[in-house]
Amino acid sequence: MATIRTASGQLVTDEMVDTWCESLDCDEWPNGWVNVGDVVHGKPPVDLGESVVLSVKVPVGMKRAIEARAESRGVSTSAAARELLENGLLAASA
């Protein structure tokens, strides 16, 4: 395993990872771990900074497809469009 250190500088060993895996496999928190909140599903946004308006013209069919995607996911049209843009940017940078 590559050398991994925690934010506090502690070295993470293979044994530590094995112990954590065993605990998590038993639906238990590993020793010393603390739950800091609810599980949030999905990937985090690329940037949590200031938002600005981006106005683009798209074909009617594309707008309807984005609206349908948004409705099926239970999110706003803007959120669905942001997700599609983000996925496109991530794919382009890979």
Image: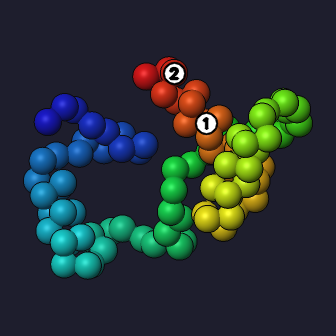
Q: Quadrant of the C terminus?
A: top left
Q: Is residue 14 visible?
A: yes
Residue type at mark 2? Ala
Q: Are marks 2 and 1 in contact (CB under 8 Å)?
A: no
- Image position, residue 3 (x, y; %): 22, 32
Q: Residue at x 42, y 43 (%)?
A: 7
Which disc number belongs to residue 44? none
Quadrant location of residue 31?
bottom left
Mark 2, residue position: 92
Q: Quadrant of the N terminus?
A: top left
Residue ranking furthest to the top: 93
Quadrant location of residue 33?
bottom left
Q: Is residue 48 visible?
A: no
- Image position, residue 70 (x, y; %): 68, 58
Instruction: In the rendered view, tell whether residue 16 sits above or below residue 89.
Output: below
Residue ranking furthest to the bottom: 27
- Image position, residue 28 (x, y; %): 27, 78
Q: Secondary structure at mark 1?
A: helix
Q: Residue at x 30, y 74 (%)?
A: 29
Mark 1, residue position: 86
Q: Residue at x 11, y 53 (%)?
A: 15
Q: Is residue 84 left or right of residue 5?
A: right
User: In the image shown, does 15 or 42 lie closer to the viewer?
Assistant: 42
User: In the image shown, does 19 or 75 lie closer to the viewer?
Assistant: 75
Task: Measure the C-alpha gap from mark 2 to mark 1.
Answer: 10 Å
Residue type at mark 1? Glu
Q: Is residue 70 left or right of residue 58?
A: left
Q: Secondary structure at mark 2?
A: helix
